[in-house]
Each structure stands twice: as structure tokens, then as C-alpha cells.
Image (cartoon, rainbow, N blue to C red):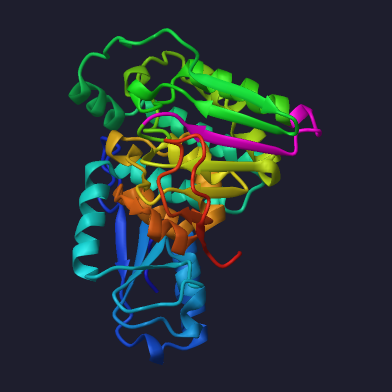
Amino acid sequence: MIDLTGIDLGPDGQPGEPLVVLEPRRPHDLSTAEAVRLAAVAERAVPLVVTVLREPPPPQLRPLLSASTLTLVDQPVSERWQQVVTVPDVGAALDTLRRAVDHAPRAAIACGQLLRQTAALPTTPALAAEAAAYSMLLGGSEFARWLAERGPARADPTPGGEPVRVHRDGATLSVTLDRPRRRNALNARMREELLAALAVADADPAIESVELSGAGPAFCSGGDLDEFGTATDLVAAYLVRLDRAPWAVMDRIAGRLTARVHGACIGAGAEMASFAGTVIAAPDTYFQFPELSMGLVPGAGGTVGVPRRIGRWRAAWLMLTGEPMSARTALEWGLVDRLTETELPHSDSPDLSMLSRTPR
């Protein structure tokens, strides 16, 4: 039996084996009992476990695929297999994954283990697990390296104005992210104002629908990078992420919340959209999770909201590699519910003719 319980940790705390690849030679000949035994090994694993298949997965392999971090296959597979990421070339995909993991192996292992937890937990403890992992990594060497490479933070050239616009029309509350010159990068002030706006809907059942959108060329380009690294008390940072972030409120009002996204949905942008009960995307939308390259894990609720839509395995692929995902793939996977035929919030009356995915 393979032993994957260790990561060959060096004296400096650097993992020597952050990723292990399992490639059954003849997967169709593997019995259900053998797949279950391999699954038990994968479930106990500390490193990331990637299963590789050169043919569509047979049903008896489901226990192994479910226990793995993710599975790569270069053959067409039904979208119902959320455990599987279909790629044009398995070898090239593995190289992409290895490069990303080798760049930040500590954060990669934390991400893989975190996704296993959040997928099985209710919202509040799942968000707490994410906040703990994120805050821990803020004190790590991989994030420190990214900060050094980024250089000094820049001052916001447009600090004035309200970063969130709120308008109520009867039973509809419209909430617009409004830092277009910064591509609606999420800073502390925007986070606070977004929380306040959504709390109104949470407290008022007469608000039947909440429309969340972004002004300018992008829905949200992620966290404001110039605020990264400003936390000096990591325990306080953990508590702020639990108490002052709007993700739990978004989850509570999800049935009334529609996110209309366009352009860049990076990091926090993709993460907050994932909590909406309905996500409507313009064709120019793309999603990306760059946190691992910074030595971090997603910290805006993404390890909670995204797996609930697309499964923890595809979430792992996106979060570990940082690969961008088009609106069309997001529709196929379930991160998006509908596509518009035209770009979304650049006019006051967007074309609402839509392409829809099969309801989950």
C-alpha cells in the first residue's frame, strides 16, 4: 500500500513532496474494492494527490476520484463528473500544476487540505477555516517573497467618492461596486460598505431581490494589492475576516441575490460572485484565482462558495494553477448560471436575452 501520509518535510519547514501523481495503468480493470483501498490512502494524504487517466473514468473509480485532490483526463467526460478536469494534454497540464505547486508548496498544501474541509462544513465554520489558513499564510515566507517582489505599495490616486453605490427601487436593491479606475479592486473601505449594503437586505425581508454589479470595465479585479501586507496582527486579521466580511451575509440572502458580472472576475471578484444564487455573465467575463502565486489561498470566501458550485476538485485546479477560465467554461462547470449575448453593465438597459445552463 502506498504511504502518502508524509510530505518529506525539511528542517526549514519546506515540503519535499507536495504533490503525488497516481496513474492506474488499466483503470477499467481496477475493481471497486481496489478503488476503495486507494481512496482510503488518498483521503489520509498530506500532499496533493492528482489522479491521471488516459481514458474516460469507469464508474468503479468514483471512490478514488472523489478522494483525490483532482483528476486529469484528456478524453471527453460527462460534466456530471465534477471530480474530473478535462484537458487537451495531460502531460502539459501536469507540468502547469507542478510549476505552480513548486512555486508555493506550503500554500498549495494548505489550499488542498482547506478545500477538503470547507466542502464538508456549514458556511460559518467553513469561512472560519479559510480565514485561519489565509491569516496563517500572511506570516509565511512565500507571501513575504511576493511582497518583496511587488515592492512598495502605491497610494490610491482616486481615494475620494463612494466605492459602493446603493439604490432601492421598491422591492429591489441595486448594489454597484464603484471604483472603476481601480477595476473595482476590493479594499477595506469597499468591503465595509458592501457589508453594510447587503446587511440591509439581510434585515429587510421586503427586499425581494438584490442586484450586485460592477461599474466600468470589470466586475472586480480582486483584492486591492496595495493593501496586501498591511496586517501586523495576524490574529486580528483572522477575526476581521470572520466579523467584517460580507460573505456569510451573501450566503444567507443567496436566494434573493443576483450577481451580474463582466470583464475581470479575479480573486475576490470570482469568490463573491460564487455566493450569489444566480450569476449572469457577459461573454467577455473571465475568472481567475491568483492567490497561490502570492503564497496565499483564496480569502474572500472562495474556498467555500466556489466548491459548492463546481465541486472541490475543479476548484482545486483553478486555485492551484491560477489558470483563467472563460465565461463559457464557467457556464459548463456551473460557476455561471446564464450568459448574456452582449456585455452587461455598460448600458442602463442591458440585453437580457440569455444562454442558460441546465439547472443544478
Vertical relation: 148 (above or below) 174:
above
Q: How far from the left and from the top, in percent, is residue 206?
A: 81, 33
Residue 88 placement: quadrant: bottom left
- Viewer-closest of 23 and 15: 23
Q: How many marks overall?
A: 0
Image quarter of residue 359: bottom right
Q: Residue at the location (26% across, 42% down)?
A: 10
- Is 79 above or below relative to 322? below
Q: Name which residue lies at 79% across and 29% down.
A: 204
Q: Is residue 161 above or below residue 91?
A: above
Image-quadrant location for residue 309: bottom right
Position in image of residue 192 (x %, y %): 56, 18
Can you name the residue that lies furthest to the bottom here? 29
Instruction: Give the magenta part as a residue range.
Output: 202-216
- Which quadrant, please, contains the C terminus? bottom right
**Is 276 situated above or below 91?**
above
Front-lying residue, 99 or 351:
351
Magenta run includes residue 153: no
Magenta span contains residue 213: yes
Image location of residue 323, percent across then percent down:
29, 51
Lateral position of residue 139 relative to residue 241, left or right: left
Q: Is residue 125 visible?
A: yes
Asked whether 1 or 167 is in front, the reply is: 167
Q: Is there any visible trace of residue 5 in the rendered image?
A: no
